[in-house]
Amino acid sequence: MGDGYDMSAIREREKEVVGNSRAFQGVAYAFIVVMLGTTLPTPLYPVYANTYSLSPLMITIIYAFYAIGVIAALLLFGHLSDRMGRRYILIPGVLASALSSLVFLFSGSLFPLFVGRVLSGLSAGLFTSTATATLVNLAPVSKQGKASMIASTVNMLGLGLGPLVGGLLAEYLPSPMRLVFIMHLVILVPAFLAIWYMPEPVKQRQKLKWTVQKLRVPPEVRATFIRGVIPVFAGFSMLGLFTAVSPSFLQKVLHVENKAILGVIVFSSFCASAAGQSLLRKASNQLVLKLGSAVLVIGISLVGLALHTHSLLVLLGGAIVSGVGQAFSFRAGLASVNAKTAAHERGEVASSFFIVAYVAISLPVIGVGLLAKATGIQTAGIVFSIVIALLALLALILSLLASRASKHTLGS
């Protein structure tokens, strides 16, 4: 006995949790379904634009409201699952996802679209870190090292499935502004049940202590942080471009009206990112970060070329290559920053890293909308691609210079 707990009983209960494959599968399913809901409206943006007479700028602003919900959740609720238990954060995440779909389902004007996006971001912010920790908790001890990678793959697959499923339903079945969200509400029911009946991994809960997550990068980590976060910013900006603006590209530049094709294009980028999580696992972070930056330069350049030449196949290639580059740069950038950061400071530094990533996926696309208003969507997309490709090139140069400096220091 100690602190009012029967330690032998706790150990027995923990044995039931660790290696619980059914609970692991249930949480993975819930993770996919919640993240799917965040990108589900992507193929519908042209429909909303026609229904409410929205410009590309307004579409990008609606999309960017997602960041408000994500960042609020990360800052306000990021570490509560360690104190309260995983279920008490994941259940609100599922409910926020359901509320988002309900708002979109019954929307009849512009304002509910903003509300739906904020709720969608809130669900993603509640789920991303907590579901990842839960999957690690539920994995067998021998496989917990792989659980984090599985969680990243599940995350990206969910984000990619949203446009794919939404595009197929919106293109080939009636009532595109309603049916996709009814479908999402239906598949959320098993997700809710999976979380509700999941064995709680956190056994020793603490008192609720509500604090805002601090964002800080210590001076000794800043150089590594900058080298790691620049390609991440580029990669997530490109994912944001595909998710928010690709409907306008396909419709107005490539003259493709089929929403299912749009879904395939966006899915291919996220699917490539999911696949990229498992590649080059034994290579050094420095090498993978350089490769990620180089691959991003190529992929983003292909996107710009596709818009210039009106080529759907080149756009598909750019989506896939950019997705792989984003996976490499994110995985290696975060790992290199974590390796450089002291254990007691990792929470603040990692939160800062994730905030930059979510800002990148949401806000830069507003610049595309602003530029499109003045120059047209094709020129705006090409200019954006050039800027992001240059940013990825800068990241590559910084990584090469850092490696050269490190070799010179070791040599001397």
Image (cartoon, rainbow, N blue to C red):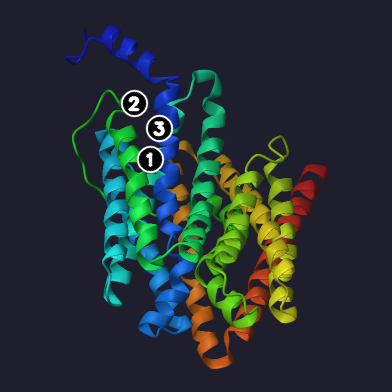
Percent from the top left, x then y, of residue 242? 57, 66
Q: Nearer the viewer, residue 213 or 370?
A: 370
Count of numbered labels shown in the rendering: 3
Return the residue at label 1: 130
Q: Nearer the viewer, residue 379 or 48?
A: 48
Q: Are marks 1 and 3 in contact (CB under 8 Å)?
A: no
Q: Nearer the viewer, residue 54 or 120?
A: 54
Return the residue at label 3: 26
Q: Quadrant of the N terminus?
A: top left
- Per the model, the C-alpha gap separating discs 1 and 2 is 11 Å
Q: Quadrant of residue 315?
A: bottom right
Left or right of 57 on screen, residue 113: left
Return the residue at label 2: 201
Q: Give, as a three-letter code, the residue at label 3.
A: Gly
| Element marked by disc 3 | helix
| Element marked by disc 1 | helix
Q: Which residue is pictured at 56% across the width and 63% down the height?
A: 260
Say if 336 sits above or below 138 in the image: below
Percent from the top left, x then y, of residue 379? 63, 85
Q: Give, as a three-letter code, the residue at label 2.
A: Pro
Q: Quadrant of residue 114?
A: bottom left
